[in-house]
Image: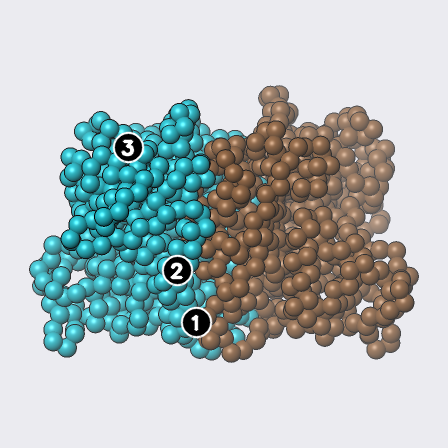
Chain colours: A brown, B cyan
Amino acid sequence: MGNATYDVVVIGAGPVGENVADRVVRGGLTAAVVERELVGGECSYWACMPTKALLRSATALRAARRLPGAREAITGDLDAAAVLRRRDAFASNWSDSGQVSWLDSAGIALYRGQGRIGSDRVVEVWTGEDGPVVSLTARHAVVVATGSSALIPDVTGIREAAPWTSREAAAAAEVPGRLAVIGGGVVASEMATAFAGLGSVVTVLARDGVLHQAEPFAGERVVQSLREAGVQVRLGAEAASVHRDGEGTVHITLTDGERVEADELLVATGRTPNTQDIGLDTIGLKPGAWLTVDDTLRVLDDGALAGGGWLYAAGDVNRRSLLTHQGKYQARAVGDVIVARARGEAVEDGRWGRHVATADERAVPQVVFTDPEIASVGLTAAAAEAAGLRIRVVDYDLAAVAGSALHAEGYQGHARMVVDEDRQVIAGVTLAGPDVAELLHAATIAVVGEVPLDRLWHAVPAFPTVSEVWLRLLEAYGR
Amino acid sequence: MGNATYDVVVIGAGPVGENVADRVVRGGLTAAVVERELVGGECSYWACMPTKALLRSATALRAARRLPGAREAITGDLDAAAVLRRRDAFASNWSDSGQVSWLDSAGIALYRGQGRIGSDRVVEVWTGEDGPVVSLTARHAVVVATGSSALIPDVTGIREAAPWTSREAAAAAEVPGRLAVIGGGVVASEMATAFAGLGSVVTVLARDGVLHQAEPFAGERVVQSLREAGVQVRLGAEAASVHRDGEGTVHITLTDGERVEADELLVATGRTPNTQDIGLDTIGLKPGAWLTVDDTLRVLDDGALAGGGWLYAAGDVNRRSLLTHQGKYQARAVGDVIVARARGEAVEDGRWGRHVATADERAVPQVVFTDPEIASVGLTAAAAEAAGLRIRVVDYDLAAVAGSALHAEGYQGHARMVVDEDRQVIAGVTLAGPDVAELLHAATIAVVGEVPLDRLWHAVPAFPTVSEVWLRLLEAYGR
């Protein structure tokens, strides 16, 4: 068994682990990452990138079909094979050689294998079960950035039926004739949209509704649009048992006795942290649990710093926000705070300081690439009320904006701004409409910047863009 | 001749005049507007709306063509006739009945005719030259919102050749086989893009370059793309004389002796204020001149308030910013300040106050709907330096953003952020790329909100969107 020492050892080389190591190295420390699968992680091969590649061509074709003059030029259908090939390219054909080159150029050491905490500040790398091949000692910090995996719900026969999770959907080599989806969250909604667009007959079994954590109008519009695209959306439907027969057909029996048949079943009911097998027990933490962290992303155990303060957790694994961009945001804070502490420099851990992930709390942006797209940041009206804020909800019909009407015939959309009345700032914004993804960052800057409404009146949207909804929302609020 | 008295009389019922009157009426005063042409103004019938309708379908079709899977479905070309019909609808078929209904519902009186200031606080309405048909007295204020018209340059024979201005281009009933354009600004660039897309053979004679007030890369990219679309762009070319022959062909002789032939000639070399015939001389102001205003948009004469302080000017006519959205922004300030003064309430005329148009100075957003789109706000690097700011320019290749690559194959674009180093805020942003229009408002809020760079690090762009360029710009700036 070999030995090596680094300032920082990161378990997991997804976008979060990569960014932690990068910040650390830029700060003058040494860093190693340990990765059991592909360098680049879930996002690169089985999530963000391939799923958006599956969705984008259909979105653009739909946009063109919504415009007189353009629609006349379109005589054919989406070419599913071409979309799958493009997806393959965006998943780098599931080769991480590009990412490995990047690690190399960034001066980050890579160890392939399962990283397991062996003792204080020590990470062992296992490539089989005969013992570690190398033992890495971290002078300053160990960072867990192992992400999460699909949760398989406790339904009779479901594992034996070999269902798809987000991974298999994102990497699908063929478009199934019939696809059933258990779940109603982001993965379920996006993949139902994608495969319906690619030609599958899709059934969605959404026990808890669709996008139920978003503003209610978001899920309603996605459901309506999925149904218009031929998707069967069964709200409240719950699978009781699943069976795949000898010919490959999946039979799903619902709790109300109804049956659904499909060629593939996608299970998208939640996530579980990848902490089962990383040696958490050696330092008294519970394997398989989410890791609790302080505002500088240091792991806590019953309120105290776990392991004496050398252990950090960033990304999905700390459950603050299961989104790549938010994990990378945490990674920048973690990397920088480890450097600051190693050098004995001041830690900027005040609200919105450099070394804390303040935005995780009430300023998390998210885009769901359905039709319509759902873009949101900050608190929904319900969440703001639950948090005890005194709010005013301002709604506006996106279709009534000149820029929207120009953007597409029959544009349908909706915007909601939640105002924190006491502070006269925006607590949250949700947009539902075609191509609203790029409108979101304006809201994120307004929320994070805590820009007062009085000042926002001076931020003039260019005419005629969809962004003019900002003026309409302010006018609806009044001054 | 009739007489009537209102609290406020507005000359010009374009978007600016309409918004002034609306704010005034909402503030409890009475208002009349005087309009010699169509209610709704240039923007509704001969500028923003119809031109964007001319451009949008081609943009959407181009976007779909840039995506494998979608491009295979497109076998035909843009249907120009369908685009022209859509344009007609967006110009309300040049009928203002909808706008008139809106005035009515908003409680604003409409007088059709030429509005001329007759004496202090008095606006006469002329429908012929036999004297005014009605005399309107304004208790509190007269607002000039008459906009601007195309400037016809002093070129031999040009008027006799009956050239198109922005109006005729926007309202064109047919697509000319050959279109020559004199000018290189926004109108010239957009209309060259539109008519090339609709099938015209286009030649652009851009004496001063293309989009020369923007960051240099903006014009360069538009020129490159116009040329790729088959447009002849002649930088530095200047027309010496113009002649339309008996068969309708326009012959343009350049100062270097070269000749250009076309079926139509669009002249887009600048604007002139519509102040020639509004009675400015009766109060000692110069007809045909731009109106100078203070920060509450009150007209100044040699530094003093013209007419004793009852005269305001909003929109193009004051030359602060020749953009519909910025004129409407001024209109809100004007309307509200007139109400405040009428009621003896406090005038909020401090920087970013309710009654001043502070954003006109250094926070004006603009989108040019060319291919690529050019979206900018605030100061260019050159303008910031000329203003004496200590700046740092941060550039980033938009094509290197994951969201851009997903958005279109071969995405080409560029982003520039100009940082005010002393204040650590953004002084300006320019984006060039397909579909960047909706990215702009984030920059506008950052500039207007004066959000410090330290805080902007917490505004996380959703992955994978084009907006991730915000993170890349901050990373390039460093922290």
Mark 2 belongs to which subunit? Answer: B
- Find residue B97 and name its label: 2
Q: Earlier in the sequence, mark 2 or mark 3?
A: 2
Residue B182 picture quarter: bottom left
Amino acid on which the number 3 mark rests in the picture:
Trp
Give the class, few, some or many, for how many residues have Cα within 10 Å of label 2's Cα (few <14, many ≥20).
few
User: Residue B293: where, in percent of width, then height?
Assistant: 27, 34
User: Residue A164: where, in percent of width, then height?
Assistant: 77, 63
Amino acid on which the number 1 mark rests in the picture:
Gly
Q: Which residue is mark 3?
A: B310
Mark 1 belongs to which subunit? Answer: A
Residue A278 picture quarter: top right
Q: Nearer the viewer, residue A393 or B428?
A: A393
User: Residue B311: where, in percent of width, then height?
Assistant: 27, 35
Amino acid on which the number 2 mark rests in the picture:
Ser
What is the spatial separation of the Cα atoms under label 3 and label 1, in whole angstroms?
49 Å
- Tell me if I can see residue B7 in this picture: yes
- Tell me if I can see residue A340 in this picture: no
User: Residue drawn at (77%, 35%), measured in percent from left and top?
Assistant: A292
User: Residue drawn at (34%, 50%), measured in percent from left and top?
Assistant: B110
User: Residue drawn at (26%, 47%), measured in percent from left and top?
Assistant: B2
Locate residue B113 relative to residue A249 in the image: left or right: left
